[in-house]
Image (tube, grey):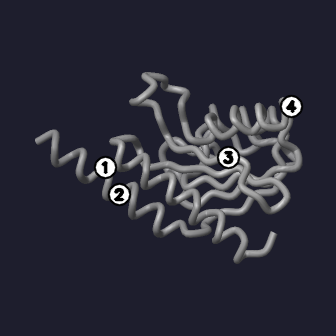
């Protein structure tokens, strides 16, 4: 995958993160890509759905598996604006996803902090694409939340 392709798809994931932000959700977005085409777009919906598992990655996985009528996404790439948590990483491992790209690292709950081998061993990883933009969006979101609580 060329870097310009990764940036294009990560921009689409950032658009999803901005939708989450506008909806009062933690601004994380994801797009699932196969053969250079976006299969599904998702963003966090934990508040809307009252579901702690409704992370952008989980929603993208569910839609992608339905699209392909398969539990495997071994020919797909996932672009996500924040490093997957352990729950999402385990789900991505079970799908045997080919390529995972994340923008910002999650220094508190990212999968690489808990178990570096949690992702599928055949998954190719790419990190930091549009990381600054994603980090800024997250910081802005949490800054606003803290201000509302005072």
Spatial distance from mark 4 to mark 2, Cα to Cα?
36 Å
The kind of secondary structure element at disc 3 is strand
Spatial distance from mark 2 to mark 1, Cα to Cα?
5 Å
Q: Please state which of the two labelled residues, at mark 4 or mark 2, is closer to the viewer.
A: 4
Give the image location of residue 9, x and y in percent: 65, 63
Quadrant in which the C terminus is drawn: top left
Where is residue 10, by image quadrant? bottom right
Give the image location of residue 125, x and y in percent: 75, 57
Q: Earlier in the sequence, mark 4 or mark 3?
A: 3
Give the image location of residue 94, x and y in percent: 80, 32
Q: Please state which of the two labelled residues, at mark 4 or mark 1, is closer to the viewer.
A: 4
Q: Earlier in the sequence, mark 4 or mark 1?
A: 4
Q: Residue at x 40, y 55 (%)?
A: 138
Q: Residue at x 60, y 66 (%)?
A: 128
* Residue on which disc 2 sits: 139
Q: Tell me the number on the disc at residue 70.
A: 4
The outermost residue toward the left is: 150
Q: Is residue 77 visible?
A: yes
Decide: few, some or many residues near mark 2? Use Cα within 10 Å; few <14, some 14-19, many ≥20: few
Q: Earlier in the sequence, mark 4 or mark 2?
A: 4
The outermost residue toward the top is: 50
* Residue on which disc 1 sits: 142
Q: Earlier in the sequence, mark 3 or mark 2?
A: 3
Q: Residue at x 44, y 61 (%)?
A: 135
């Amino acid at each position: 995958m060329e870097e310009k392709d990764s940036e294009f798809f990560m921009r689409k994931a950032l658009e999803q993160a901005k939708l989450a932000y506008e909806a009062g959700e933690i601004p994380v977005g994801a797009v699932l890509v196969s053969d250079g085409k976006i299969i599904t777009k998702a963003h966090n919906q934990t508040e809307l759905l009252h579901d702690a598992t409704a992370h952008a990655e989980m929603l993208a996985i569910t839609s992608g598996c339905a699209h392909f009528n398969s539990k495997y996404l071994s020919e797909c790439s996932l672009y996500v604006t924040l490093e997957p948590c352990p729950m999402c990483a385990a789900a991505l491992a079970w799908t045997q996803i080919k390529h995972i790209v994340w923008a910002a690292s999650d220094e508190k709950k990212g999968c690489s902090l808990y178990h570096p081998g949690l992702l599928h061993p055949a998954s190719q990883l790419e990190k930091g694409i549009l990381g600054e933009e994603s980090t800024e969006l997250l910081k802005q979101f949490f800054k606003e939340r803290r201000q509302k609580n005072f």
